[in-house]
Amino acid sequence: MLSSYDLGRKLRHLRLRKKIGLVDLGKHTGLSASMLSQLENGKLVPTLPTLARIAMVFDVGLDHFFTNRTKRSLCSVIRAGERMRFPDRADAPSPAWFFECLAFSTQEKSLQAYLATIEPREREHVIDHVHDGAEFLYVLNGSLAITYAEEEIQMKQGDSAYFDGSQPHGYRALGTAPATAIVVTTPPRL
Protein backbone atom coordinates (compact mmCIF):
# COMPACT_ATOMS: atom_id res chain seq x y z
CA MET A 1 0.00 0.00 0.00
CA LEU A 2 2.81 2.45 0.82
CA SER A 3 4.33 1.96 -2.63
CA SER A 4 1.44 3.96 -4.12
CA TYR A 5 2.78 7.07 -2.35
CA ASP A 6 6.17 6.77 -4.12
CA LEU A 7 8.02 7.98 -1.01
CA GLY A 8 11.49 7.30 -2.42
CA ARG A 9 10.93 9.42 -5.52
CA LYS A 10 9.61 12.28 -3.41
CA LEU A 11 12.62 12.07 -1.09
CA ARG A 12 15.08 12.05 -4.00
CA HIS A 13 13.27 14.99 -5.63
CA LEU A 14 13.55 17.06 -2.42
CA ARG A 15 17.23 16.19 -2.00
CA LEU A 16 18.17 17.00 -5.60
CA ARG A 17 16.12 20.21 -5.59
CA LYS A 18 18.13 21.41 -2.57
CA LYS A 19 21.37 20.06 -4.13
CA ILE A 20 22.22 18.02 -1.04
CA GLY A 21 24.22 14.80 -1.29
CA LEU A 22 23.29 11.66 0.59
CA VAL A 23 26.21 12.07 3.03
CA ASP A 24 25.25 15.66 3.85
CA LEU A 25 21.60 14.73 4.25
CA GLY A 26 22.72 11.95 6.57
CA LYS A 27 24.56 14.47 8.74
CA HIS A 28 21.43 16.63 9.03
CA THR A 29 19.07 13.76 9.77
CA GLY A 30 21.30 11.42 11.77
CA LEU A 31 20.61 8.67 9.21
CA SER A 32 23.29 6.84 7.23
CA ALA A 33 23.83 7.61 3.55
CA SER A 34 23.26 3.90 2.86
CA MET A 35 19.86 3.97 4.58
CA LEU A 36 18.86 7.13 2.72
CA SER A 37 19.85 5.51 -0.58
CA GLN A 38 17.74 2.46 0.22
CA LEU A 39 14.80 4.73 1.06
CA GLU A 40 15.16 6.60 -2.23
CA ASN A 41 15.35 3.35 -4.20
CA GLY A 42 12.29 1.88 -2.50
CA LYS A 43 14.26 -0.97 -0.91
CA LEU A 44 13.39 0.19 2.58
CA VAL A 45 10.12 1.59 3.94
CA PRO A 46 10.65 4.59 6.24
CA THR A 47 9.08 4.87 9.66
CA LEU A 48 7.14 8.01 10.54
CA PRO A 49 9.95 9.30 12.83
CA THR A 50 12.42 8.85 9.94
CA LEU A 51 10.12 10.74 7.56
CA ALA A 52 9.66 13.44 10.21
CA ARG A 53 13.45 13.97 10.45
CA ILE A 54 13.73 14.25 6.67
CA ALA A 55 10.70 16.56 6.45
CA MET A 56 12.24 18.92 9.03
CA VAL A 57 15.48 19.19 7.01
CA PHE A 58 13.55 20.16 3.89
CA ASP A 59 10.99 22.31 5.74
CA VAL A 60 8.00 20.34 4.52
CA GLY A 61 5.19 18.68 6.46
CA LEU A 62 4.67 14.93 6.61
CA ASP A 63 1.71 15.42 4.28
CA HIS A 64 4.24 16.19 1.51
CA PHE A 65 5.03 12.47 1.35
CA PHE A 66 1.41 11.31 1.36
CA THR A 67 -0.21 13.69 -1.11
CA ASN A 68 0.37 14.26 -4.77
CA ARG A 69 0.57 18.00 -5.29
CA THR A 70 1.48 17.85 -8.98
CA LYS A 71 -1.16 15.37 -10.07
CA ARG A 72 -4.64 16.09 -8.69
CA SER A 73 -6.39 13.47 -10.75
CA LEU A 74 -9.87 12.34 -9.88
CA CYS A 75 -9.17 8.98 -11.49
CA SER A 76 -7.64 6.34 -9.25
CA VAL A 77 -7.39 2.69 -10.27
CA ILE A 78 -7.11 0.01 -7.60
CA ARG A 79 -6.34 -3.43 -8.98
CA ALA A 80 -8.19 -6.44 -7.56
CA GLY A 81 -4.95 -7.96 -6.25
CA GLU A 82 -4.05 -4.77 -4.35
CA ARG A 83 -7.06 -4.78 -2.04
CA MET A 84 -6.85 -6.07 1.51
CA ARG A 85 -9.65 -7.93 3.29
CA PHE A 86 -10.68 -6.93 6.83
CA PRO A 87 -13.23 -8.33 9.29
CA ASP A 88 -15.99 -6.07 10.65
CA ARG A 89 -14.12 -5.91 13.98
CA ALA A 90 -10.47 -6.81 14.49
CA ASP A 91 -11.25 -8.68 17.72
CA ALA A 92 -14.26 -10.63 16.38
CA PRO A 93 -13.84 -14.41 16.81
CA SER A 94 -16.56 -14.96 14.19
CA PRO A 95 -16.84 -11.85 11.96
CA ALA A 96 -20.31 -10.89 10.73
CA TRP A 97 -18.83 -9.60 7.48
CA PHE A 98 -15.57 -8.90 5.71
CA PHE A 99 -14.89 -5.81 3.64
CA GLU A 100 -12.40 -4.64 1.06
CA CYS A 101 -11.93 -0.89 0.54
CA LEU A 102 -12.31 -0.33 -3.19
CA ALA A 103 -10.56 3.06 -3.25
CA PHE A 104 -8.06 2.85 -0.38
CA SER A 105 -5.26 4.86 -2.00
CA THR A 106 -7.46 7.63 -3.42
CA GLN A 107 -6.85 10.99 -1.77
CA GLU A 108 -9.60 13.41 -0.70
CA LYS A 109 -12.49 11.00 -1.27
CA SER A 110 -16.05 12.29 -1.07
CA LEU A 111 -17.32 8.74 -0.50
CA GLN A 112 -16.07 5.32 0.63
CA ALA A 113 -16.78 2.19 -1.42
CA TYR A 114 -16.43 -1.38 -0.17
CA LEU A 115 -16.89 -4.90 -1.40
CA ALA A 116 -18.59 -6.67 1.50
CA THR A 117 -18.83 -10.41 2.07
CA ILE A 118 -21.64 -10.94 4.57
CA GLU A 119 -21.68 -14.17 6.54
CA PRO A 120 -24.81 -16.19 7.41
CA ARG A 121 -26.00 -15.97 11.04
CA GLU A 122 -29.14 -15.94 13.11
CA ARG A 123 -30.95 -12.63 13.55
CA GLU A 124 -30.21 -12.51 17.28
CA HIS A 125 -26.46 -12.59 16.49
CA VAL A 126 -26.51 -9.50 14.26
CA ILE A 127 -24.42 -6.71 15.80
CA ASP A 128 -25.68 -3.26 14.83
CA HIS A 129 -23.32 -0.38 14.18
CA VAL A 130 -23.64 3.31 13.34
CA HIS A 131 -21.56 5.84 11.40
CA ASP A 132 -21.96 9.38 10.16
CA GLY A 133 -23.39 10.02 6.72
CA ALA A 134 -25.49 7.97 4.34
CA GLU A 135 -25.06 4.39 3.19
CA PHE A 136 -25.96 2.71 -0.08
CA LEU A 137 -25.88 -1.08 -0.46
CA TYR A 138 -26.24 -3.09 -3.70
CA VAL A 139 -26.51 -6.90 -3.49
CA LEU A 140 -24.20 -8.55 -6.04
CA ASN A 141 -25.09 -12.14 -5.21
CA GLY A 142 -26.81 -14.20 -2.59
CA SER A 143 -29.51 -12.91 -0.29
CA LEU A 144 -29.16 -10.91 2.88
CA ALA A 145 -31.09 -9.08 5.51
CA ILE A 146 -30.44 -5.57 6.75
CA THR A 147 -31.52 -4.80 10.29
CA TYR A 148 -32.45 -1.12 10.37
CA ALA A 149 -34.30 0.70 13.14
CA GLU A 150 -35.26 -2.67 14.65
CA GLU A 151 -36.82 -3.83 11.36
CA GLU A 152 -35.33 -6.61 9.21
CA ILE A 153 -35.41 -5.98 5.46
CA GLN A 154 -34.72 -8.98 3.21
CA MET A 155 -32.87 -8.40 -0.04
CA LYS A 156 -31.73 -10.55 -2.97
CA GLN A 157 -29.35 -10.18 -5.90
CA GLY A 158 -29.92 -6.89 -7.73
CA ASP A 159 -31.73 -5.19 -4.83
CA SER A 160 -30.37 -1.99 -3.34
CA ALA A 161 -30.97 0.14 -0.27
CA TYR A 162 -30.13 3.69 0.77
CA PHE A 163 -30.33 4.79 4.41
CA ASP A 164 -29.05 7.08 7.13
CA GLY A 165 -25.93 5.47 8.61
CA SER A 166 -26.37 7.23 11.96
CA GLN A 167 -29.26 4.86 12.75
CA PRO A 168 -28.34 1.42 14.16
CA HIS A 169 -28.03 -1.12 11.34
CA GLY A 170 -26.48 -4.53 10.70
CA TYR A 171 -26.37 -7.27 8.11
CA ARG A 172 -26.60 -11.03 7.81
CA ALA A 173 -26.63 -13.42 4.87
CA LEU A 174 -29.74 -15.54 4.58
CA GLY A 175 -29.38 -19.26 4.04
CA THR A 176 -26.06 -21.11 4.32
CA ALA A 177 -23.83 -19.21 1.87
CA PRO A 178 -22.27 -15.75 2.27
CA ALA A 179 -23.72 -12.85 0.27
CA THR A 180 -21.66 -10.15 -1.43
CA ALA A 181 -22.59 -6.51 -1.81
CA ILE A 182 -21.15 -3.18 -2.80
CA VAL A 183 -21.46 -0.74 0.11
CA VAL A 184 -20.94 2.99 -0.39
CA THR A 185 -20.86 5.46 2.50
CA THR A 186 -20.72 9.23 2.39
CA PRO A 187 -19.57 11.77 4.95
CA PRO A 188 -22.26 13.67 6.88
CA ARG A 189 -23.83 16.72 5.27
CA LEU A 190 -22.66 19.95 6.84
Image (tube, rainbow, N blue to C red):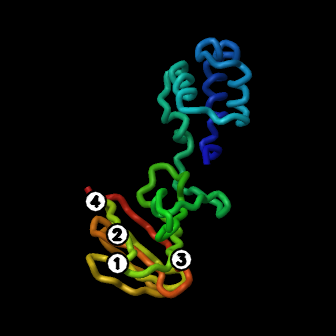
- Quickly name the residue at label 1: 147
- Nearest to the eye among marks 2 and 4: give it: 2
Identify the residue shown where x is 50% and y is 68%: 94
Q: Residue furthest front?
A: 93
Instruction: Kindly check if marks 3 and 1 are in contact, taking CB atoms under 8 A apart as contact.
Output: no
Q: Position of residue 107 (x, y in %)?
A: 49, 49
Instruction: Kindly check if marks 2 and 1 are in contact, taking CB atoms under 8 A apart as contact.
Output: yes
Label 3 sits on a secondary structure element that is strand
- Quickly name the residue at label 4: 189
The Cα atoms of the two marked residues, 3 and 4, are separated by 28 Å
Identify the residue shown where x is 54% and y is 85%: 176
- Quickly name the residue at label 3: 180
Q: Is residue 157 visible?
A: no
Which class describes the residues within 10 Å of circle 1: few (<14), some (14-19), or many (20+)?
some
- Quickly name the residue at label 2: 128
Q: Where 10 sits versus 57, above or below?
A: below
49 on left or right of 10: left
The Cα atoms of the two marked residues, 2 and 3, are separated by 18 Å
